[in-house]
Image (cartoon, grey):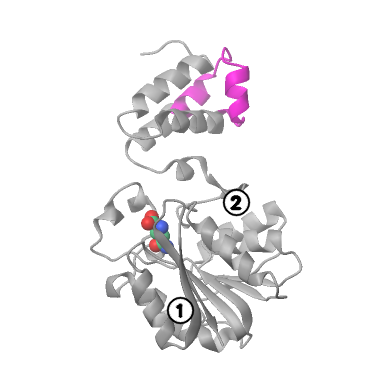
């Protein structure tokens, strides 16, 4: 039992405990300590001799145990950075992935010479819609989710970050008005039920409805592509995130639906991740 309750000592023991369970043990320990102290990472290194009180130590210990059980850091701290902003997350929302920044980047490129409007389908914590709204305050931004609990998180994020987004509870296009969009983007569920990935890397803690899709992961991708032409302005774009082996079939579905200028772009690890097409 470690009796020294100084920051430097707790950081080192937390990091040691997490090492067999996490590839980022040191960072995890820092983030959990910051969360218990309600301070940023600079504080840890400025005040290494700071002594934690009993309650802070107890809450740190509890968080370390949950991390050892495999719960993602973002759910333990309730937040995750994306596009240089801090987003709240809960177990009702997927944890934003850096890969999705590629989707935001390309949505912004497609919006560069239009006045919008833009819609993000299945927004979760709201990251895609909120980032677009922050970068393009001049356009109308909409976002849907089937989950009211997720939309509550997304609304709070929009308010916290000063983004104006119209949130709508809807299963894809189901409850949308007959409006046309310049750009539609979505990071839908796309993992096949039998994919072992679903049972690893903290995914069991994430909302299964936001991860898993029928038809080998293609049910939602297909539903969105098939319905989206009715909601796109002439020359409007649809952008979809998908699994790294799903690009070819996603392009085929877009082609069959009459999309042109179809292209796939890789994520930061070089995997096919986002496919887009233009409805002419
Ligand atoms: N990219 C996520 C993962 O593989 C899945 C996201 C999704 O299904 N939309 O962990």
* Closest to the observer, 265 or 139: 265
Please give left or right for residue 244 compared with residue 229 in the image.
left
Label 2 neighbour load within 10 Å: few <14, some 14-19, many 20+: some
Please give left or right for residue 226 compared with residue 162 in the image.
left
Count of residue discs = 2
* Bounds of the magenta segment: 37-60
> Is 54 one of the magenta-colored residues?
yes
* Closest to the observer, 38 or 182: 182
Residue ID at (37%, 51%): 205
Quadrant containing the N terminus in the rendered view: top left
Q: Is residue 204 positioned above or below 260 on the image?
A: above
Please tell me in which quarter of the rendered image ligand 1 is found: bottom left
Describe the element under mark 2 as helix, strand or loop.
loop
Q: Please provide percent x and percent y for residue 161.
A: 69, 53
* Closest to the observer, 185 or 199: 185
Label 1 neighbour load within 10 Å: few <14, some 14-19, many 20+: some
Mark 1–mark 2 Cα distance, whole angstroms, equals: 25 Å
Q: Where, by quadrant of the figure, is residue 165 drawn?
A: bottom right
Q: Is residue 130 positioned above or below 119 on the image?
A: above
Q: Please provide percent x and percent y for residue 258.
A: 47, 88
Quadrant containing the C terminus in the rendered view: bottom right
Residue ID at (58%, 82%): 176
Residue that mark 1 sits on:
224
Q: Please provide percent x and percent y for residue 112.
A: 68, 69
- Whichever of labels 1 and 2 marks the residue nearer the N terminus, that label is 2
> Is 53 one of the magenta-colored residues?
yes
Residue ID at (29%, 66%): 192
Residue that mark 2 sits on:
83
Q: Is residue 70 positioned above or below 44 on the image?
A: below
* Closest to the observer, 176 or 81: 81
């Amino acid at each position: 039992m470690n009796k020294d309750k100084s920051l430097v000592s707790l950081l080192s023991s937390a990091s040691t405990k997490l090492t067999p369970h996490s590839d980022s043990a040191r960072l995890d320990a820092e983030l959990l300590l910051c969360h218990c102290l309600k301070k940023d990472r600079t504080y840890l290194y400025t005040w290494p001799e700071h002594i934690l009180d009993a309650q802070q130590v107890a809450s740190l210990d509890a968080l370390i145990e949950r991390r050892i059980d495999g719960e993602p850091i973002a759910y333990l701290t309730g937040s995750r950075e994306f596009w240089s902003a801090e987003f709240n997350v809960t177990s009702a929302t997927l944890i934003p992935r850096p890969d999705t920044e590629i989707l935001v980047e390309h949505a912004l490129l497609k919006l560069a010479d239009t006045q919008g409007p833009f819609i993000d389908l299945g927004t979760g914590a709201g990251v895609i819609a909120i980032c677009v709204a922050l970068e393009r305050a001049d356009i109308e931004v909409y976002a849907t989710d089937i989950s009211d609990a997720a939309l509550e998180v997304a609304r709070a994020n929009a308010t916290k970050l000063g983004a104006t987004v119209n949130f709508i509870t809807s299963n894809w296009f189901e409850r949308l008005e007959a409006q046309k969009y310049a750009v539609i983007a979505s990071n839908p569920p796309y993992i096949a039920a039998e994919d072992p990935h679903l049972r690893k890397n903290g995914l069991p803690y994430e909302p299964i409805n936001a991860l898993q899709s029928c038809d080998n992961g293609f049910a939602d991708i297909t539903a969105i592509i098939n319905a989206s032409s009715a909601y796109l302005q002439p020359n409007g774009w649809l952008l979809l995130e998908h699994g790294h082996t799903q690009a070819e079939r996603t392009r085929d579905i877009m082609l069959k639906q009459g999309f042109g200028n179809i292209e796939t772009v890789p994520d930061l690890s070089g995997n096919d991740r986002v496919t887009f097409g233009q409805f002419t």
